[in-house]
Amino acid sequence: MLLLIVASALLASSTVLGQKCDPIRFDQCQQTFARIIGADPSVDWKKPRDLHAAIQNVYINGLDATTPGIVSVCNAYNAFMQCIRDDGYSYQDCFSANWLLSLNSSIVTPYDTYYYVGVMVQVSYQCSAGFYPAVDNWPCIQSVYKNQGAALDKCLQTFYINAQGNPYRACEFFKDGMECYQGTFRHCRDEVMYWGCESFRSQAHIGYEGCKQSCQVNQFFGDVQPEQKMKLVDSERYTKNAAEQIEA
């Protein structure tokens, strides 16, 4: 039996400043999430890219031979949310980039905290409105994560680097990223392409709430490779080291 409650009620803005969340209890709840997906407990909000990779590893390999990876991740996500709620805290209390940054700004950067909150908002979408489209089309989605995972990551990292280097064009790059992510799922059904676009939008929107673009079915047309559309843009604030991050 699928041990899953579609947690649409838990969807909320993650930009509200945390009011009461207890950092020790939050870490314990985060460790519960990591344990369920088979990740090291140290892979938490302070290591957001490692956490993102651990989630995608479950999507690719699953935790067992019979359960789709999306179900395992969503079970872990719901356990995480229940852990927070059992102590009287809310999503808004704990999932705030500013609050997380205030806990340990000597170790994490604003980029780290926004990236982490974005990852969890993406999982929140994939475990609520995006859950049934994913389960219905899981073999194709799993194949994309397995064979095109680097392309998906490059869509995201290119957006972040371009938006930080050219903030006045951030929403242009946001749209490019949506199309890049959606295009990577182009060999799946239309609803999966939409799912891919919305997965990017939900994550990248954190910190870029002014970008109002929305996902549409068949937004990305043709056989043009998405990476041909998603390129780094030069700017005075752009650095070689940043560029090397997405080439690694």
Image: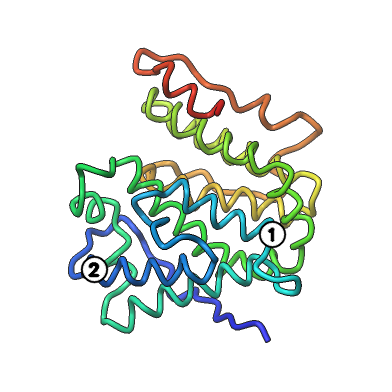
Question: Which residue is located at x 65 percent, y 49 percent?
Answer: 216
Image coordinates of residue 10 in percent, x first then y, are 42, 73
Question: Which residue is located at x 47 percent, y 48 percent?
Answer: 50
* Position of residue 84 in the picture relative to residue 123 (left or right): left
In the depicted structure, whether residue 48 falls above or below residue 180: below
Real-space Cα separation, disc 2 to disc 1, in angstroms: 31 Å
Using the image as rendered, state which of residue 103 and residue 93 is in the foreground: 103
* Position of residue 181 in the picture relative to residue 12 (left or right): right
Query: Which element is circle 1 on?
Result: helix
In the depicted structure, whether residue 123 falls above or below residue 218: below
Q: In which quarter of the image is residue 18?
A: bottom left
Image coordinates of residue 211 in percent, x first then y, are 43, 41
Query: Which corner quadrant holds the C terminus?
Result: top right
Using the image as rendered, state which of residue 13 and residue 55 is in the foreground: 55
| Crowd rating for badge 1 (residues with CA inside 10 Å; few <14, some 14–19, many 20+) | some
Image coordinates of residue 33 in percent, x first then y, are 45, 69
Look at mark 2 in the image and give the residue it sits on. 24
Q: How many marks?
A: 2
Query: Which element is circle 2 on?
Result: helix
Image coordinates of residue 66 in percent, x first then y, are 75, 74
Using the image as rendered, state which of residue 245 and residue 94 is in the foreground: 245
Mark 2 or mark 1: name the one nearer the start of the chain: 2
Q: Which amino acid does label 2 sit on?
A: Ile
* Position of residue 218 in the picture relative to residue 42 (left or right): right
In the depicted structure, whether residue 155 falls above or below residue 39: above
Q: Which residue lies furthest to the bottom in this view?
A: 1
* Position of residue 188 in the picture relative to residue 40 (left or right): right
Look at mark 1 in the image and give the residue it sits on. 61
